[in-house]
Amino acid sequence: MSFERALRCRECGREYDLAPVFSCEFCFGPLEVAYDYDGIRESISRDRIEAGPSTLWRYADLLPCDPAYKVDIGTGYTPLIDAKRLARAVGLKQLWIKNDTVNPTWSFKDRVVSVAIARARQFGFEAIACASTGNLANSVSAHAAAAGMDAYVFIPDDLEQGKVVGSGVYRPTLVMIEGSYDDVNRLCTEVAADHNWAFVNINVRPYYAEGSRTLAYEVAEQLGWRAPQHVVAPMASGSLFTKIWKGFQELHKVGLIDEPHTRMSGAQASGCSPIATAFQNHTFNFVPQKPNTIARSLAIGNPADGYYALKVMDETGGGAEMATDEEIVEGIYLLAETEGIFAETAGGVTVACLKKLVASGAINPNEETVAFITGAGLKTVEAVLDSMDEPIHIPARSAAFDEALRARNARVPAGVGA
Ligand SMILES: *Cc1c(COP(=O)(O)O)cnc(C)c1O
Ligand SMILES: [Zn+2]
């Protein structure tokens, strides 16, 4: 049972039957799932959601798949942290961290894959595939394993070890491509035409993308059924960013929250910033880039939803920022030291850009802000390995420890960093 009604072209509005297709035959615009919102409004209620499972399946009424086909490895309903120390550090009165590092494969991609694999199974696919910057490969591999499906995952050949092992351990067919994500994606579009596989971000992309809306649903519920005043979220293809905004609007449409007035701000790495650059140049037409950044999970030089992300910033009065590799590393440390959350490079981008947005006045210090931390740091240890404090390394004798501690305290007075 689900309330998906049709696929609709985002450009010309033509509607299509619910099938594994992703672009309009007439104008090549991207297709998006359309819902029977009246039906959802009648079925859904705050009580019903609150009584649901502690996963994203509590929002099944809003998902474009029959939950009977779900592969549930525990995705979603992640913590919303009252980030007091980070708020003070960046100059905000009220800041929340949506901590999506704690999903089953340690990134928000478990949300989109949960929906995509359920819909793929409902369509009757026996194999699942993806073109990935790393996290998606991890999630597709894990979900396919749990479902007993074949998985074909395609990644660039220069990814961090954590991202490679994070797929390989589930034993998918792992394909490393000589080139960037944009090369991987181009190849996969060709491969998808030759095989009857559900490519989560190609032929089932309209369903896949809808999984990101659950981030907005959770935040609104966790805030006591309301939308925040400002959101900062990372952008790769720009899909996640646009779907958070869609999620808040939908909750209003089905009667669960007041009309949202959230200002939506996006975060990118300076080394791959087609969307943020276009925003700063006051244009909706981004120029594709060749990525060169440690934030590999965000390294999409030709972002499929870049145009729509820019529209969301414009419509909501939001902003965009970008962070250098050095600032990304600082952002990772700042989040870790203030809130005890170890994020991957994408989280460093988000924190660094949050800080810049407040500093520039794009976020008012009084605006209640939610920052989305979308992936865990153990996947990208390379980013911080060389900049960690040197550990104390001693023989197993207490005298050696006393001496080392005295030497350390002479260098760094106790209490610094607290
Ligand atoms: C994929 C990804 C994103 C954003 O992806 P979009 O393509 O913009 O939807 C953000 N953070 C992490 C960690 C990711 O893996
Ligand atoms: Zn069209």
Image (spheres, rainbow, N blue to C red):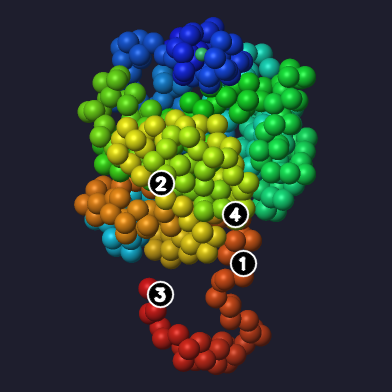
Task: Mark 3 vs mark 2: give the one in front.
Answer: 2
Instruction: Please name the residue shown 63% across and 46% down the image.
Output: 290
271 to 186, vertically: above or below? below
CA–CA distance between discs 3 and 2?
Answer: 35 Å
Q: Secondary structure at mark 3?
A: loop
* Residue 417 - label: 3
**Amino acid at pointer 1:** Leu
Precedes in sequence: disc 1 or disc 2: 2
Precedes in sequence: disc 4 or disc 2: 2
Precedes in sequence: disc 3 or disc 4: 4
Q: Which residue is mark 2?
A: 280
Q: Are marks 4 and 2 in contact (CB under 8 Å)?
A: no
Q: Which residue is mark 1?
A: 385
Q: Nearer the viewer, residue 182 or 416?
A: 182
As drawn, is 123 to the left or to the right of 206?
right
Task: Mark 3 vs mark 4: give the one in front.
Answer: 4
As drawn, is 273 to the left or to the right of 180?
left
Picture quadrant where residue 388 is located? bottom right
Within-10-Å neighbours for mark 1: few <14, some 14–19, many 20+? few
Q: Secondary structure at mark 4?
A: loop
Instruction: Please name the residue shown 50% across and 87% down the image.
Output: 408
